[in-house]
Image: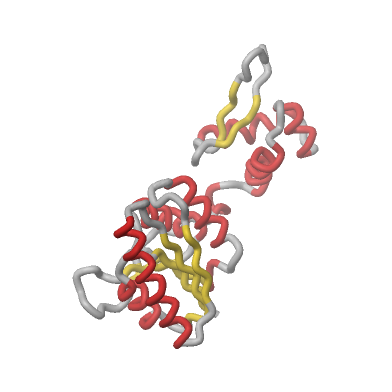
Amino acid sequence: MTILFGTLGFTPSKFLGALKTLPEVERVVFYTAHTDRARDQERSAVAIKSVEAALRTLDVPYQHVAIPDPFDFAAILERFLGDLQKVDPHQAMFNLTGGTKAMAVAATVACMVLGVRAFYVPEEQEGAAARELPVIRIRYASVLTAAQRKVLEAIRDEEPPSLAALAMGLRIQPPTLSGHLRKLEDLGTVRLENPPGGGQLRIPVLTEA
């Protein structure tokens, strides 16, 4: 089974070009985002209807996701990562031809992090086949140990009020936690902050990375 993810701008042929040339696509998830300008809304609506009509004709199940802000890179990346994490990366492909630059870059980063193949359809070639981008795919396992990932997940999910609370929640000793945090700080994924009025107290916070 192949799941095709893709960003759709105002030119449906670029999205449909990937659909026609990539093998055995059994499900499609496509994303749109546009400005508040009436003309952009109209063009986006036409493109969406065209893609949906083609997918219905091909009898391919699909999901259309409307992204509120076409330029909010962090929010777009978070959405792409969340959706891609729900599927087997070996069964997913991402066509990043359409949409805003923020969407294209977010899709590229998501593919790199999760090991998903990325494709584009050359804008300047009518009827061109989708081409795979030579994107370096980085698995979490190649960057983080299992223990470090657990620390990151605990910080994200529990928002611990102190390092002691984090260590207790993970059921590890504070010196062991300190070692993990030093490496995570070196990777730029965590920073330690002093809350207002907290004295020597420090709390772990995830960075954008």
Tell me what residue is drawn at x 35 percent, y 71 percent: 46
In screen coordinates, is 61 left or right of 161?
A: left
Q: Which residue is drawn at 36% across and 65% down?
A: 44
From what the image shows, is residue 70 above or below residue 164? below
From this view, report whether residue 194 is shown above or below residue 107: above
- What x and y, as percent, mark residue 160? 71, 32
Please identify the residue farthest to the front as the structure is shown: 38
| Rendered image coloring scheme | secondary structure
Extreme residue in the left direction: 124
x and y, in percent, of residue 29 in the image = 50, 69
User: Residue 70 or 201: which is nearer the viewer?
Assistant: 70
The count of marks equals 0
The residue drawn where x is 45% and y is 87% is: 57
Please name whichever residue, 71 or 113, is drawn nearer the observer in this view of the structure. 71
Looking at the figure, which quarter contains the N terminus?
bottom right
**Residue 39 image-quadrant placement:** bottom left
Q: Which residue is drawn at 50% across and 57% down?
A: 80
* Residue 55 in picture, x, y percent from top left: 45, 81
Residue 115 against residue 193 in the figure, above or below: below
Q: Is residue 159 left or right of residue 207?
A: right
Quadrant housing residue 100 = bottom left
